[in-house]
Image: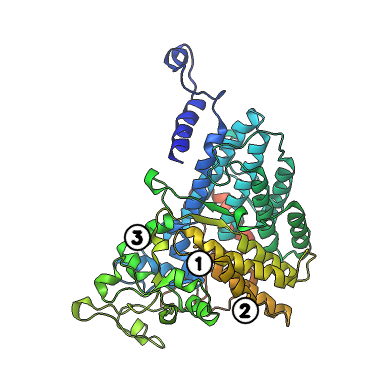
Amino acid sequence: MKKYISIFLTGILLAVSSCDGDFAEINTDPNRADGNVFDPNLILPTVQSNYSNMMTGYTGAILFQSMWVQVMASTSTGGANYYSNADKYVASGSTNSYIQSVWNDGYAAASRVYQMQSLAEEKGFSNLVAVGTIWKVLTLSFVTDIYGDIPYSEALQAETGITQPKYDPQSEVYMTMLSELETALSSISDSGDEIKNDVMYGGDLVKWKKLGYSIMLRIAMRLVDVDPSTAQSYVQKAISGGVFSSADDEAVLVSDQGNGYANSSANALNVTDDIYEVRWSDNLINFLKANNDPRLSVISEIPVAGLAANKGTAVGDNDPALQIGMPNGFDLKGGATDITNAPNYPGSTGSGDDISPIGKYSRPTAIYRDRDAPVFILTYAEIQFLLADAAARGYSVPGTASFYYAAGLEGALESIGKFGGATISSSVASAFASANPLDTSSSEASLSMINEQIWATTGIFANFVESWNNWKRSGYPELTPVNYTGNFSSGQIPRRQLYPASESTTNPDGLSNAISNMGGDTWINTVWWDK
């Protein structure tokens, strides 16, 4: 990946450079690319990497959504007080920086896509333009689901003079994204240009189309409460076009630590304070234990006893029977909310100066600290669960909710092997799905099971923002908010991030209109589709 990105950086700088008179002719290296010969395919691995970094690590997902939605937990004290943003909805010293990270990274990534598409259009690379649209929609759908109304129709056009783009209502953003996906996907042709330098699909147009239609399905399913007719229409279009049909299709982006492209979540979870402080929430561990889920021993371990060992990476005990999740909302401050006062507190490990009060709580295994671990952008399992959700709602889909639910379970278990650690065989996955069929006694019973699995599966794949988004959409699992002293969300689980403070000076009118349209700029007012 590093090779492709380095070539891109050299080429794009030359492509956009120009001078008057003879200076350019005299100082132009005839052996280097200019805008006429630069291949925009060289930008593709950069935009893929940009997206994976936006959805992982300290950009926000671990620091906010992982614990808002109670997949993970932390006592948020000592060196890791930055997790107070997540576990207790209490601001830390860098909260304002975390707030704007997705916004800044998302628009930077989308701008790079725009550059790629502009060059591709000049060369008649229609397939690359379409791939760019798929990636732009993926990127900006991530941004709008976190903030709400965003610049879209006038975004990315600074070179044409639009430096303060209007904020479009999210309802319009969604309709535009769906329409753009439909147009782009219909334009992809086997007889068109070859997609090169593709580090995710190797230029396979069939898989790119499946990704596009799978994104369409997920976007459509966001609308089930606010615009069910549009939701059903685009669900059917996505199915007709062809969504992921196996785990081989899913969007999983490789990492490359050796060349500077490490998994950002692993970077975070290798920090000593994070190794110690970040634990699995009791909600997730109890959910997996209740179902005898084989993923439990793959993702979770009890660290070696003692404070020093808890801060280290020595392999712990992954016996499923021993796993204990940490309840959210506790600290290590000695007061009423001290973890030692938590219900069913299991006790500490170690003694004297080497005592660890949280030592018996389960933490992520080494697969989450592997900087070469892939980033799970959109999985086959998630798509199957969304199809199960659609079927449970009575939408016209080819299969039953039970069929899609079982396929989702099998896919979730088998794909965990892509982390590079322990694997779960197809026979074990199939047996687990057979032993845990969908409850079809009512649509609500089905929807509860389906969406609890989406929450658990996306959380296990470290796609914490999607765990949170789907919880907002579906209401499952039913979570009890933390009401810690000094929280910024009135004791409620945050449902969006605030707009970046910088927007008040760089685009004040657009920001003001968006805040008015959304009814405020708080952590708890909802985005358009969140009903």
Report how far apart the C-alphas of labels 1 and 2 lie in the structure.
21 Å
Task: Give how far across and how far down residue 3 sits, in percent.
Answer: 44, 36
Q: Which of the two marks, 3 or 2, is nearer to us in this view? A: 2
Q: Which residue is mark 1?
A: 460
Q: Which residue is mark 2?
A: 435
Whether residue 486 appears in this view of the structure is yes
Pointers 3 and 2 in contact (C-beta within 8 Å): no
**Image coordinates for residue 289, horizontal then vertical, percent:** 50, 80
- Image coordinates for residue 94, horizontal then vertical, percent: 38, 60
Dot 3: what SS? loop
User: Residue 144, located in which quarter of the rendered image?
Assistant: bottom right
> Which mark identifies residue 226?
none
Local secondary structure at mark 1: helix
Looking at the image, residue 472 lies above or below residue 129: below
Distance CA(mark 1)–CA(mark 3): 17 Å
Give the residue displayed 36% in from the left and 62% down from the top: 93
Quarter holding residue 365: bottom left
Residue 152 in sight in this render:
no
Q: Earlier in the sequence, mark 3 or mark 2?
A: 3
Q: Is residue 145 rendered to the left or right of residue 360?
A: right
Q: Is 428 displayed left or right of 269 in the figure?
A: right
Q: Give the residue drawn at x 74%, y 64%.
A: 227
Looking at the picture, tell me which residue is in the foreground, 393 or 331: 393
Q: Nearer the viewer, residue 379 or 124?
A: 379
Q: Which residue is mark 3?
A: 270
